[in-house]
Amino acid sequence: MGSYGQPGYEAFKADPSSGARSWTYGVPLCLMPGTGPAVLESVGPRSTLGSGFAFLGAGVREFTLTPEHTFIISTDPWPPPTSVVPDPMKAAPGLAVSGPPCSQYQNGSPYTELLIGLGWTSPDGGGWEGIEITYTVDGSRHVLVLDHDLMICGTSVDCGSPSTP
């Protein structure tokens, strides 16, 4: 299993000064060539930063990518509103991911997206430094480690100061 099909780093930061108190982060999932369905066992952080956040849940949605029906990077709240994520969200643990293959995503192709919910609990903020997805293929256990940070701004996570006019 993979995410973009190649190594890379991403970081997303949500700012509670917007008034939101929970967020949904989207991460693509795909299968490496020659592998069968991957059954998700668990989703969690590689490590954490700060203490002002909570894990709210994880789900998966599957849809066909079009200009009008796209993936999300992040949105608020958790769970995501149907106006942003109109597809049914299935619980991640126990779900069999059967595609798409890891390749260039393009319009008209199937898309599988892992949705992770984090909530703000205190001004400390914080979040996940990396994502670990445990899954099995043909009874063999694997762990996909993504260098993908999911953060909530606070004293532990600097998001910079807003510019003033």
Image (spheres, rainbow, N blue to C red):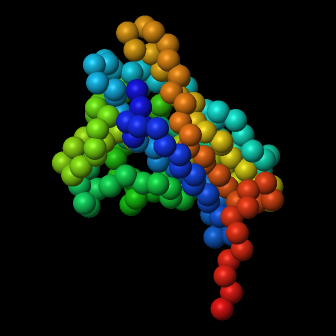
Identify the residue at horizontal 60%, vertical 46% (top origin): 149
Query: Residue 30 lies in what quarter of the image?
Result: top left
Q: In this rendering, would 37 be left or right of 27? A: left
Identify the residue at horizontal 61%, vertical 39% (top origin): 130
Foreground residue among 68 and 19:
68
| Residue occupying the far bottom of the picture | 165
Q: Quadrant of the C terminus?
A: bottom right
Identify the residue at horizontal 25%, vertical 41% (top origin): 110
| Residue occupying the far left of the picture | 108
Q: Quadrant of the N terminus?
A: top left
Identify the residue at horizontal 29%, vertical 38% (top origin): 103
The x and y percentages for residue 48 are: 72, 40
Query: Residue 68 lies in what quarter of the image?
Result: bottom left
- Residue 79 visible to an observer of this rendering: no
The x and y percentages for residue 14 are: 62, 60
Q: Please tell me how many numbered marks the rendered image carries.
A: 0
Q: In this rendering, would 72 be left or right of 50? A: left
| Residue occupying the far front of the picture | 7
Residue 61 to residue 91: above or below: below
The x and y percentages for residue 120 are: 70, 54
Query: Residue 34 lies in what quarter of the image?
Result: top left
The x and y percentages for residue 87 are: 34, 47
Residue 128 to residue 99: above or below: below
- Residue 52 visible to an observer of this rendering: yes
